[in-house]
Image (cartoon, coloured by chain):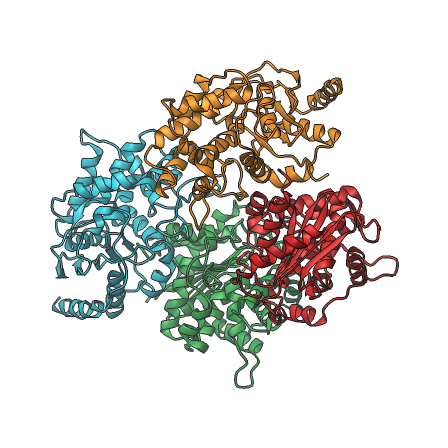
Chain colours: A orange, B cyan, C green, D red
Amino acid sequence: MSDLKKIFEEIGQLVQSIRDGALASYIPELANVNPQQFAMAVVTVDGECVSFGDDQSLFTLQSTSKPFTYGLALEEHGEAFVHSRIGVEPSGEAFNSIIELEKKTHRPFNPMINSGAIAVANMIQDKANIQREQRVLNLFSELAGRKLDYNREVFSSEKKTAHRNRAIAHLLRHFEVIGDDIEESLDLYFKQCSINANVKDLAAMAATLANSGVQPLTQKRIYKEENITRMISLMFTCGMYDSAGTWAYTVGIPAKSGVSGALFGVVPGKMGIACFSPLIDGHGHSLRGVCAIREFAKKMGLNIFK
Amino acid sequence: MSDLKKIFEEIGQLVQSIRDGALASYIPELANVNPQQFAMAVVTVDGECVSFGDDQSLFTLQSTSKPFTYGLALEEHGEAFVHSRIGVEPSGEAFNSIIELEKKTHRPFNPMINSGAIAVANMIQDKANIQREQRVLNLFSELAGRKLDYNREVFSSEKKTAHRNRAIAHLLRHFEVIGDDIEESLDLYFKQCSINANVKDLAAMAATLANSGVQPLTQKRIYKEENITRMISLMFTCGMYDSAGTWAYTVGIPAKSGVSGALFGVVPGKMGIACFSPLIDGHGHSLRGVCAIREFAKKMGLNIFK
Amino acid sequence: MSDLKKIFEEIGQLVQSIRDGALASYIPELANVNPQQFAMAVVTVDGECVSFGDDQSLFTLQSTSKPFTYGLALEEHGEAFVHSRIGVEPSGEAFNSIIELEKKTHRPFNPMINSGAIAVANMIQDKANIQREQRVLNLFSELAGRKLDYNREVFSSEKKTAHRNRAIAHLLRHFEVIGDDIEESLDLYFKQCSINANVKDLAAMAATLANSGVQPLTQKRIYKEENITRMISLMFTCGMYDSAGTWAYTVGIPAKSGVSGALFGVVPGKMGIACFSPLIDGHGHSLRGVCAIREFAKKMGLNIFK
Amino acid sequence: MSDLKKIFEEIGQLVQSIRDGALASYIPELANVNPQQFAMAVVTVDGECVSFGDDQSLFTLQSTSKPFTYGLALEEHGEAFVHSRIGVEPSGEAFNSIIELEKKTHRPFNPMINSGAIAVANMIQDKANIQREQRVLNLFSELAGRKLDYNREVFSSEKKTAHRNRAIAHLLRHFEVIGDDIEESLDLYFKQCSINANVKDLAAMAATLANSGVQPLTQKRIYKEENITRMISLMFTCGMYDSAGTWAYTVGIPAKSGVSGALFGVVPGKMGIACFSPLIDGHGHSLRGVCAIREFAKKMGLNIFK
């Protein structure tokens, strides 16, 4: 593990020179962060944790939350139901593509893009007297291994300005992918995106996927093994939007990014890796984060096709 | 004018054999009409009126209202302002295309499609203590030459089920084509679509355009002459959606259709023509109406390129 | 007619200030012209001709030839046959759009875009011992009222570099819009595009359309009246590519442009107007030509919807 | 290995009931085969070979040849050069999509679709007095571990009818992705597609990729290890065209299909799997082949994310 520390330091040096990119501007609250932050962490399936840089900084999960709520929908409703409403094909579209639904079926292409994730949120129901919002917060707390909360400022900032996501939700309603609880589904979606975590939390979530669904620090099983396969398959083909092919080609591990600058990768059977650095590129990925995970995967030989 | 009666009778015979098409289903209330109705009317620029068939039947204007509110926006704000937010190019898309905005400018393609018409509705403001909804109702009453009202059942049916139009409005808000009064703009749009008229009313509206903006029965000027040119230009290139080219090629007069089965054409300097017959084709045009106006234009030699 | 001279001079002054645009670069030979040239001409249906500027300069017709060969195909095969292979809808695409065919029918959208014009060329056959290339040259000579020839340098320059048009032709063959005489059809198309004319010739061609098919100088009937309606209808909706809507809205007369900087308009029953000025905009239209015809139409009140 | 025999037999039973699909019709010669054929084979990295069914039947490789010539281009020119002309992103388009190039770069999306494979063929050059066609034939012979030849009837059938591929090649020339040797590049592409092989040959080719580039029967190194990673990465994200996501989700191994009914998968470090059964679905994949490899992967637990 001391090797990891050293590798992190080298990568930390390397990414210093990356000063391009911009803060996500479309959620006003996201623009209020120190853009030069950089953090990296690994949690292994054995429960070891190594971190580097601004590893205490909190960020909102944004789209990195999508694979996890998708998994929750699988657990709750089974694959057949979930995929009667959402596809499994990459859309070939940018993260900020307006509103793309499969032309024949009028379903979202996959659960990793906004339309798919809103459809997933719509599936999560209250259960055993626990409201669905609390259920989602509980899920992410279990994944992190500690109690998380959501960022009320980001939530309300997102809720106020999310005209595109609201358009998507109404279109999903039009095609009967979701029901009449449009605002409730959007609220749940905005809340999952607004959950505050640090880079070690995100690495622990990733490690749960690497560990076949069992959180490696608490040893609690969160997902069935078969659902893990589904989650990381879709991360691999769809998680990085219209640069998924480039990511698969150059890095070769299932990953998911969020516009807050969060990015995580899963190395099945080995570890979860997470980065946080808020300056993002035109695809919506953290510039330093992409570089850091690519270098880390290269140095450690993590490409799944290698 | 007795010739017109005879031509209408011949056309009335001819369209009897057309029994294809379907009632518009996406506004539930629209499906509650007698599908076999057929009505036709002409109002000349001299104020003569000839009608045929179910000429007392009321129908809602639906998209046939679009050119008229577009004209109102021109009168109120001037061309430069209106077209800073809405384009003048055909979209090449079907009437029920999801949500198409110009790719570079993110504006609606033109005021004849839903997105453009919602953007137009957003521009109409209260004025001199008259609320915008009343202003629009007044406009159509003046165009018809008699007091019109809107159909409350259709309005509330449309308001409840218009998930796609609501999606469009939120997307327009996202791109800052419209402001925060989203629901108010939609309400106004649904109301203009829900105005009840008969075929003679619609022919009188059309005749107002044919008569350079002066209503031929009341002699009241409703639009400036220069705005009439704009309105009928856009009807010609964009009024019939993705069959605009076929219509221009085979009929050759500016026209606009609505999913209620309303259809009207403008012969500048001569007359307005209107039809009503509720069975519509895949483009959203009245099947009998299209046939009737095409035959009428042929018999009367009305093609503007002839 | 002395008024026309004066209007031309004013417009000639006005367009002096337009210095944007570029020479068409994709046919190397087209780049070898004096970019500052400007010429304008009108031929009335009574056979009067007024011209201005570089009215002796020869240019190649390029896409301005398309309506005329389309008319020849109509004369030769009738409307039904021609439009079994080519549509009548605007494509909504730029002049240099790759290769767009109607999605359902796999036909060219209309005869005014390259794919449609190549399909038209494919229809022109040898007849009565006159080869098809000679027939086309004869047609344009009759339209101009004097013997024209084609520019061999431009023809062979175009033939050598026309990879996109060759791609289109093979795709048309794939969808069985054209037969196996792919190269012959392309040759014919390149030849019609390479015909040399001056601005008075082009105005005379346009005046033939304005005069219902009878060349106004020679009084020879070239097209049937009913085919003229078809030709100018399609020029109106499709002749200016993806700015057809803007042209119809701001100018309002049927027109066609070519990348050599040629541009002509038809005022039915009145006159043909032509311009030549080689600097073109991103739509492929002569910048000075567009301005000149727009101003001319405004001063003379030629908008067909006015 | 006796287990494999048994599994093959079970799968052979299972696929008997699949009787949908059609023979590829667009290459006339491909329609002359017995549609009920079914064959399956595995070659392990240790050089063991098990086969089943019509394992002596020859079929043409068609698109299953694409990963292998792509690898040859990588070996010959290096990654940087190859991917200056061809991308690495899935196109989201069907196997028979007309002609899709990346919009910004005008390059083929990836080497697994026709445009990319033609661009690859264009890169293969004569070398050391061996003509490029012979080089390609040598490559596939080495991959199979025995001398292969190409099917002259299929080659000339394809050459005669390949209007779409010819259109693609001219478009690639237009965008300067390939040079002037258009016909030569197409000939090479048609030849690689026309190579005759049986299911054991194809399994041996696949096993070479599974074995990091060393043919497991002859022990000859054919590709560098780093190029193998590239080849199977692109097979995984792009090899199954617009059903690549579904394949990754349900099967989870890199694969490639051809319209002759050939299909192969690679299990890195373990084995190559091949199927042949000529009835194909709308994506161009062998119906029985898809079912067979999916079942085989499930029974053997081969999903890379498992």
Residue most toward the right?
D128
Q: Residue at x 22, y 51 (%)?
A: B31
Near-viewer residue (D143 or C239)? D143
Near-viewer residue (B157 or D197)? D197
How far across and how far down the image is residue D221, in percent?
83, 49
The answer to which image quadrant residue C232 occupies is bottom left
Pick the quarter of the image with the C terminus of chain D: top right
Residue most toward the top?
A56
How far across and how far down the image is residue A4, in percent?
73, 21
Residue most toward the bottom?
C128
How far across and how far down the image is residue A287, in percent?
63, 28
Q: Residue at x 55, y 16 (%)?
A: A58
How far across and how far down the image is residue C132, in percent?
56, 77
- Left-right relation of D65 to A64: right
Can you say whether A19 is above or below B278 in the image? above
Can you say whether C259 is above or below A287 in the image? below
The answer to which image quadrant residue C181 occupies is bottom right
Residue D177 visible in the picture: no
- Left-right relation of C143 to B38: right
The answer to which image quadrant residue D36 occupies is bottom right
Near-viewer residue (C204 or B168)? B168
How many numbered marks appear? 0
Residue A220 visible in the picture: yes
Near-viewer residue (B33 or D306)? D306
- Left-right relation of D161 to A297: left
